[in-house]
Image (cartoon, grey):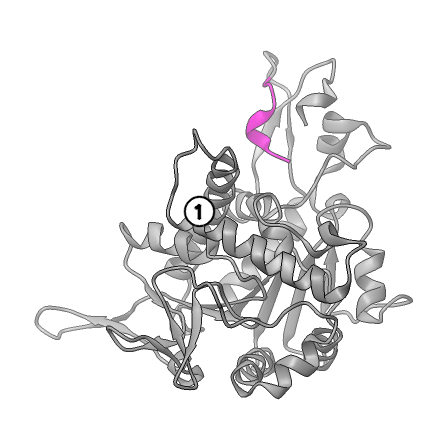
Amino acid sequence: MKVGNYMEANKNEKVNIYKKEIVKEIKNCCFEKQLNILIGSGCSSSSMPLMSKYRGLSQEEANNRLLEDIIRLSKLFFYKLSSKKYKVVEKFENTKKNYVKFMGVILEILNKSNARQTPRAVNIFTTNYDLFIEDAINQIQINNRLVFNDGASGYFARVLDSTNYNKVVAFKGLNDNYISEIPSINLIKIHGSVNWEMKDEKVHILNSVSNDPVVVKPTGYESQDTVVNSHFHEMLRVFQLELDKPQSVLLVMGFSFQDKHFVKLIRRAIQNPELIIYIFIYSGDGKDISNNLGYAETTPSNLKIITPDKIFSKEFMEYCSGAEETSRLTITIEEVAEMLNQPEKEIKIKDEVETDEC
């Protein structure tokens, strides 16, 4: 759902787009708690294929096709080939714009947070192979002071090491008369990346797309593959340790929880009473997510399944698609950014609703 697509009425009547209480609750948690974000393939699905595209193929063939397509599309995106020749580049630009918007809002939250209460840092965990997050952060870094930490160290040869995430960077005045913590964005790519390559038994992060990237393929045995490989095990350990910390919050987007190992990690982490998890559901009632997590009957009080009807106001849903039809109201990464940025946003309404605009 893109609010900007709605035609504003000539009348002065307005409605709130979001339910203020739940949106303010989420935003306050982002300010007051240690912020963690889990981004799944759904956030890039407008530009990158999902595993469901390869139904009917054998598991091995589907895995290979998925990785091949992501590598090919990532090269088109990374090398910014002409949109006249490749129409898919337009989709890349829209996806990139959404990521840039989201990362910009997260940076604003970090800048406004109280460094004495919580570190000005966010941990972004993702199982995606693509480079949309890196590209978005690279863009906002041009005009903003922030530290981007992808876990690598080195200059000509950038080698991945999980211990590199345990850093805090501060800015001191010219006369050393004050210290101000610089906002940090830590990116932890749990299943690898198209720009990771194995050299001398070490994972190197390249400034290009590899033809043979280091990734965990979606075989259905991710947990086994991830744990066997010591590096990926370290990435999962970082994820678990961060969620075990007091006063933490985890925002989840574009994630279906079909990876059983991730389900175990979430169920273990939710036992931390000071952790709050918000899972944003793209559409529907979220029962499939609850079932995947093993909470078909009841969910823990600190696990919040955020469906469209819980985030959008009743008046707005009626305006957009009718009181009984909410399928066109979806929660995307762009919508989460808009919600956190303008929780009290309003829209003018008109007498006759054109649902195609929603």
Q: Which residues are magenta?
A: 1-8
In the displayed structure image, the side of residue 102 where residue 56 appears, left or right: right
Q: Amino acid at mark 1?
A: Phe
Check residue 332 for magenta coloring.
no
Image quadrant assignment for residue 322: top right
Residue 254: percent from left, percent from top: 65, 55
Residue labelled with disc 1: 77
Q: Image quadrant for the C terminus?
A: top right
Q: Image quadrant for the N terminus?
A: top right
Q: Main secondary structure of the magenta part?
A: loop
In the displayed structure image, the side of residue 47 where residue 224 appears, left or right: right
Mark 1 surroundings within 10 Å by alpha-carbon count, few (fewer than 14), some (14 through 19), many (20 or more): many
Number of numbered discs overlaid on the protein picture: 1
Residue in the image at 46% along x and 57% along y: 131
Residue in the image at 69% along x and 82% along y: 224
Asked if residue 185 can be seen in this view, the reply is yes
Residue 36: percent from left, percent from top: 54, 68
225 up-or-down from 26: above or below: below
Asked if residue 272 can be seen in this view, the reply is no
Residue 148: percent from left, percent from top: 35, 65
Check residue 4 for magenta coloring.
yes
Mark 1 secondary-structure assignment? helix
